[in-house]
Amino acid sequence: MRIVNNEAEEENYEIIYVSSTEIFEGDAISFIGVPTIHSGFDNVGGGFTNSIIVVGSYVEIVEE
């Protein structure tokens, strides 16, 4: 799953999580994990997005 922190758009996380959880666009989540790799990708409209790959051990949907 790819998580974007809307409060600070430069913070992007890609979480590797083995269990099954239904998370939809717009859901707020809380997660615990180990940051494993720093990655990134080119944006379609130009620029580059940094991303932190996290191996997640706990993910839950939280009420906003």
Image: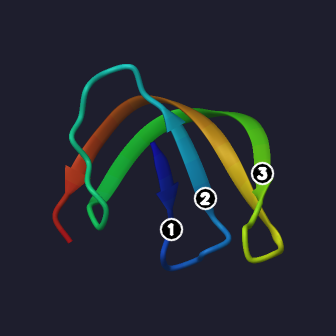
Residue at 68% x, 46% y is: 52
Q: Position of residue 21 (x, y in %)?
A: 24, 34
Rendered image: mark on residue 5: 1
Q: Is residue 41 left or right of residue 23?
A: right
- Cβ–Cβ under 8 Å for marks 2 and 1: yes
In this picture, is 48 found above or below 23? below
Check disc 2 and report the residue beneath it. 12
Q: Quadrant of the C terminus?
A: bottom left
Q: State the separation of the CA atoms marked 2 and 1.
A: 6 Å
Amino acid on which the number 2 mark rests in the picture: Asn
Check disc 3 and report the residue beneath it. 40
Q: How is the image coloured?
A: rainbow
Is disc 1 surrounded by few (<14), some (14 to 19) or many (20+) residues within 10 Å?
few
Is disc 3 surrounded by few (<14), some (14 to 19) or many (20+) residues within 10 Å?
few
* Circle nearer the viewer, 2 or 3: 3
In this picture, is 34 found above or below 41? above
Q: Quadrant of residue 29?
A: bottom left
